[in-house]
Amino acid sequence: MTRTVLAAALAVVLAGALAAAAPAHTTSPAARRALTVNVVDMEFQPRSVSIGLGSSVIWRFRDGVPHTTTSNQGFWNSGNKSAGQTYVRAFTSAGRFAYFCKLHPHMTGSVAVPMRRSGTATAGWTLRWSTKAGGSDRNFDVQVRRPGTSTWATFRTNTTRATAFFNPPRSGTYRFRARTGNTSNGSHSGWSAVLTATIR
């Protein structure tokens, strides 16, 4: 009986030592949230991508000639990049962001970034269209489509706030969309995909 107990205890100690010595296999949050677009064969592959709010896109340049990734609305410009180089951008606000290659304008792409929500149908929702507040060069427009209507109405215009709480007295399913404004040149991204929020 004593030998059995000692053997079991020794097995536990050895297992713990092995676990401590083993390398930890973890993936950083940044790596989990990054999506890759390859710039190859005179194309952006894939041409259109959808990522979560706050996620990043990595453009990997693989062609033998230089290219750029340049926002249509002036949100970013990678500059000329050659084979083996990369460009990374975090998308911190909602919208549909079109881009192209300045050296080869027929090369186009887009990045779709949705809104987020948190809460419940009975207690209300916190709507988020940006991971951070806007500033001197960024603001946001948010529209709502109320139950029983087919038209969009203003929810927020030119706001620099990143969120808003929503809990109206009328129940039903509400729909929202947002876009990001570049106040340095007066342009806007396209509208984000529709986010639904049900109120009971």
Image (cartoon, grey):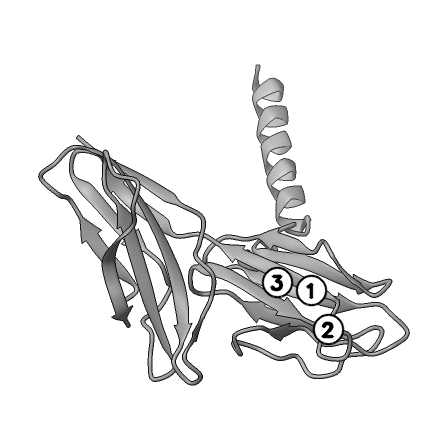
Position of 58 with respect to 162 (left or right) is: right
Front residue of 166 and 43: 43
Question: Which residue: 23% across, 36% down?
Answer: 147
Question: Which residue: 37% across, 50% down?
Answer: 116
Quadrant placement of the N terminus: top right
As helix, strand or loop, the secondary structure at mark 3 comes to strand
Labels 3 and 1: the sequence-earlier one: 3
Q: Which residue is mark 2?
A: 105
Q: Which residue is mark 3?
A: 57
Give x and y (percent) for residue 112.
53, 55
Q: Residue furthest top?
A: 1
Q: Amino acid at mark 2?
A: Pro
The crowding category of the residue bearing disc 2, from other C-alpha atoms within 10 Å (few below 14, some 14 to 19, many at least 20), is few
Give x and y (percent) for residue 142.
30, 58
As helix, strand or loop, the secondary structure at mark 1 comes to strand
The crowding category of the residue bearing disc 3, from other C-alpha atoms within 10 Å (few below 14, some 14 to 19, many at least 20), is some
The crowding category of the residue bearing disc 1, from other C-alpha atoms within 10 Å (few below 14, some 14 to 19, many at least 20), is some
Q: Which residue is mark 1?
A: 108
Question: Which residue: 71% across, 79% down?
Answer: 102
Front residue of 165 and 12: 165
Is the residue under label 1 in contact with that under label 2 (CB below 8 Å)? yes
Q: Quadrant of residue 77?
A: bottom right
Quadrant placement of the C terminus: top left
